[in-house]
């Protein structure tokens, strides 16, 4: 009876959380499984199944099976081995999550195109309602659609500010912006980031709230060798963001910005005078410093650029790059830059960076720093040249950022074979990319919605 009451409680909790709960229990040898919807965007959702060993002895494996309506399909999954036969889906444990001690749990996740939820579910061969496998689909409510919002992101949130270790909007409510970064503007294959129709489409279909203009600085064809072109690209993105009502990060996308401090001071000072009155703009003066000193190299650079910005723009947020490709936020926390509405950059790539880097972020937050992940990917740190995606670790990062109110922009809006290229060949410049998602894009889009 104790197990049955626990299962009922989990089922009700799943329904209240906005998902449908399915459970299974058989005497002595079965696990229970609870299904929930963790993200919902109307025509699709992100689902999760939590498997729990409710027996008094360890189990060494588990297998969850269910059907979806023919109008709904699973496009990606993680933390389980998926096999598919028509509309029937089977998920078996992977090597590291099959052994469950008594009372232990694990979970796997998946992305669904369509609104159908699992039916005919079994766990280790037992029916999800208990007893034999079902012969007719159980009745399950559809995922709950999030309450509608009105207005553009900027209309809803207005002027942003740093409040403690998080970001707040004009009403004092905590805000977590989610969006995407452009490719290095000097290397993009087409002007995706500069297209107003595409920006509006991402706002309306992906729930994009912020776009990052990654203006390359040092390579050939970037700002230092062609400042007029680079500036025009950035200003186009700023003006489009104002029209679309989204936020825009102006990113000095450099690795050795201290060598060109005077150019950065002039660039940000000029743009702050002309755009600093807008609530849309967020400044990022240094993308990814290399392994150089925070106190003697990076911090003095930031102080100079922050002073130039604040001479014309007293309140828009400035996000400061940190040592070692914007990873050593704990080092910056030991000697922060003096000023208001300052945040610090943390970058991760989930195949390379895990809990040890999140620990650095935790240390910085405990020290009082506000963080902004202006670049991340579900790939290796090279952007995913091997095409591999590490979604379980990426989900751990997503959960951590959500728990800490950390805003983010994912890398990168372009076409190519890298895992982090969001678009596949043939993607039109103007948007409408539902059938052109590539690499980690389905995961990124699901977590924007």
Image (cartoon, rainbow, N blue to C red):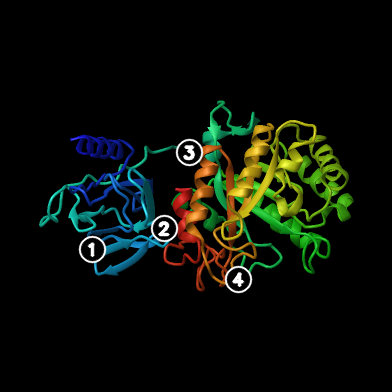
What's the distance in space between the residues labelled 4 and 2, CA to CA? 22 Å
N-term-proximal mark, 1 vs 4? 1
Q: Which residue is mark 3?
A: 151
| In contact (CB < 8 Å): disc 2 and disc 1 | no
- Quadrant the N terminus occupies: top left
- Is 44 in front, or is 50? 50
> Which residue is identified by label 2?
79
Disc 4 secondary structure class: loop
- Give the mark toward the camera: 4 or 3: 4
**Which residue is pictured at 74% across the width and 47% down the height?**
322
Q: CA distance from mark 2 to mark 1?
A: 24 Å
Measured along the vertical axis of the image, is residue 366 above or below residue 145? Answer: above
Do the residues bearing badges 1 and 4 touch, measured as CB atoms within 8 Å?
Answer: no
Q: Quadrant of residue 352?
A: bottom right
Looking at the rendering, which quadrant does residue 300 occupy? top right
Q: Nearer the viewer, mark 4 or mark 2?
A: 2
Q: Residues within 10 Å of mark 4 (few under 14, many from 20)?
A: some
Of the image marks 3 and 1, the number of the one nearer the N terminus: 1
Residue beneath the point at 48% across and 51% down? 395
Classify residue 191 by image quadrant. Answer: bottom right
Is residue 255 rendered to the left or right of residue 156? right
Along the polypeptide, which appears first: circle 4 or circle 3?
3
Which tag is nearer the camera, tag 2 or tag 1? Answer: 2
Where is residue 137 drawn, in percent x and y? Answer: 14, 54
């Amino acid at each position: 009876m104790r197990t049955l009451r626990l299962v009922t409680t989990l089922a009700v909790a799943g329904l209240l959380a906005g998902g449908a709960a399915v459970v299974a229990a058989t005497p002595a040898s079965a696990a229970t499984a609870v299904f929930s919807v963790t993200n919902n965007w109307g025509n699709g959702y992100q689902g999760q199944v939590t498997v729990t060993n409710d027996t008094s002895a360890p189990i060494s494996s588990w297998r969850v099976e269910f059907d979806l309506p023919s109008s709904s399909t699973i496009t990606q999954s993680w933390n389980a081995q998926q096999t598919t036969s028509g509309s029937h889906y089977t998920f078996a444990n992977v090597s590291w999550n099959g052994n469950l001690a008594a009372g232990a749990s694990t979970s796997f996740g998946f992305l669904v195109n369509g609104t159908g939820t699992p039916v005919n579910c079994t766990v280790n061969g037992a029916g999800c309602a208990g007893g034999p496998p079902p012969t007719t689909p159980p009745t399950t409510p559809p995922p709950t659609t999030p309450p509608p919002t009105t207005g553009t992101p900027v209309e809803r949130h207005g002027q942003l500010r740093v409040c403690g270790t998080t970001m707040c909007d004009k009403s004092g409510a905590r805000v977590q912006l989610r969006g995407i970064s452009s490719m290095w503007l000097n290397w993009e294959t087409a002007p995706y980031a500069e297209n107003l129709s595409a920006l509006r489409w991402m706002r309306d279909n992906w729930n994009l709230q912020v776009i990052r203009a990654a203006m390359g600085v040092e390579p050939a064809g970037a700002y230092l060798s062609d400042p007029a072109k680079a500036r025009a690209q950035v200003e186009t993105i700023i003006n489009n963001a104002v029209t679309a009502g989204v936020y825009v990060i102006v990113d000095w996308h450099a690795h050795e910005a201290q060598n060109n401090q005077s150019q950065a001071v002039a660039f940000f000072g000029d743009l702050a005078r002309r755009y600093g009155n807008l609530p849309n703009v967020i400044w990022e003066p240094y993308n990814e410093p290399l392994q150089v000193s925070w106190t003697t190299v990076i911090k003095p650079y930031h102080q100079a650029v922050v002073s130039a910005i604040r001479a014309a723009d007293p309140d828009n947020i400035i996000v400061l790059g940190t040592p070692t490709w914007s990873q050593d936020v704990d080092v910056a926390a030991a000697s922060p830059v003096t000023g208001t509405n300052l945040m610090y950059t943390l970058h991760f790539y989930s195949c390379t960076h895990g809990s040890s880097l999140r620990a650095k972020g935790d240390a910085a937050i405990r020290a009082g720093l506000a963080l902004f992940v202006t670049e991340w990917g579900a790939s290796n740190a090279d952007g995913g040249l091997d095409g591999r995606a590490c979604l379980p670790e990426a989900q751990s990062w997503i959960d951590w950022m959500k728990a800490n109110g950390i805003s983010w922009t994912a890398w990168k809006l372009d076409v190519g074979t890298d895992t982090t290229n969001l678009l596949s060949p043939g993607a039109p410049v103007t948007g409408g990319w539902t059938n052109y998602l590539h690499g980690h894009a389905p995961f990124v889009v699901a977590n924007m919605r």
